[in-house]
Amino acid sequence: MSALREAFLDELKDLLDAELQLLKALPKMAEAAQNDGLRVAFQEHGGQTANQIKRLGQVFAAFEEPVRGKKCKGMKGLVEEAQELIEEDEGDAALIAAAQKAEHYEIAAYGTLMSWAIALGQDNVTQLLRETLEEEKATDKKLTVIAQTVVNTHDSLRDAEPKEAPTPRRKPKSRPSDSQTRKRRSTKRPSATRGKTKSGKAPRSKRLRSGKRK
């Protein structure tokens, strides 16, 4: 077995497992999507992914190899990241980002396999891989359009929210100064001339009593 053929089959097994992982994750992503267009896109891509797995089976057959996958660590990490976003309710924009990461991973993998298939002279395999590659690219473009709609809608809703008027701050009451306090106290003190008339003389009753004593 040539080194290129061996590398091709190894990458093919990795890609098969990646597709199987994504097939299980897409229904959860569709359920978590709030945007109707995004939900439908995930559901449609689930059907595409099932057909892509069948094409990979045909590629195995063309190389007369058993259909067997190899754990894809790359897709495993991407699926786990998407699951965290769902659990944390990060919203549609974050879901789209996670889905496009998976699409870009698959686009790179299918592009590599197609180039190797051409080098190995496998025309039929090349056609099968090209068909799937075009589907992956189309899905990525669709997600980009949906992402722009989701973000624009989010911004519009945010701008439409009524803004609360700022509550006016109350000015703190100023305390009277020491001089003002002393002035108020002085006005409340009883007059020192209490018991005398305005003319400065004692009341008549006192004057009469003093006259009798004399």
Image: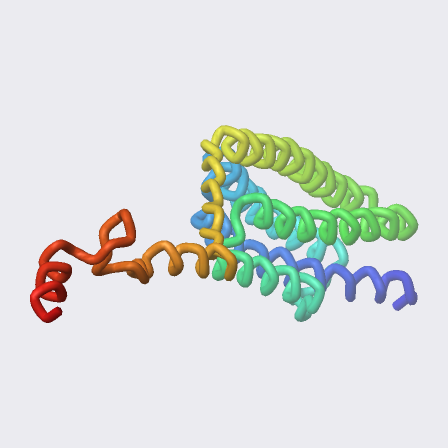
- The residue at the far front in this view is 214
Q: Position of residue 163 (x, y in %)?
A: 48, 34
Closer to us: 182 or 111: 182
Q: Is residue 54 placed above or below 148 in the rendered structure?
A: below
Q: Quadrant of the C terminus?
A: bottom left
Q: Is residue 25 left or right of residue 77?
A: left
Q: Number of marks in the image? A: 0
Closer to us: 174 or 79: 174
Q: Is residue 97 placed above or below 150 in the rendered structure?
A: below
Q: Position of residue 136 (x, y in %)?
A: 68, 42
Closer to us: 189 or 76: 189
Q: Is residue 114 left or right of residue 188?
A: right
What residue sits 78% from the left and 66% below the top? 10
Q: Is residue 63 left or right of residue 190?
A: right
> Is residue 201 in sight in this rendering?
yes
Scheme of colours in the image? rainbow
Q: Position of residue 63 (x, y in %)?
A: 76, 58
What residue sits 54% from the left and 29% below the top? 156
What residue sits 50% from the left and 51% below the top? 29
Q: Quadrant of the N terminus?
A: bottom right
What residue sits 52% from the left and 38% below the top? 38
Q: Is residue 193 left or right of residue 22?
A: left
Closer to us: 100 or 47: 100
Q: Is residue 210 placed above or below 198 in the rendered structure?
A: below
Q: Position of residue 4 (x, y in %)?
A: 90, 61
> Is residue 67 in sight in this rendering?
no
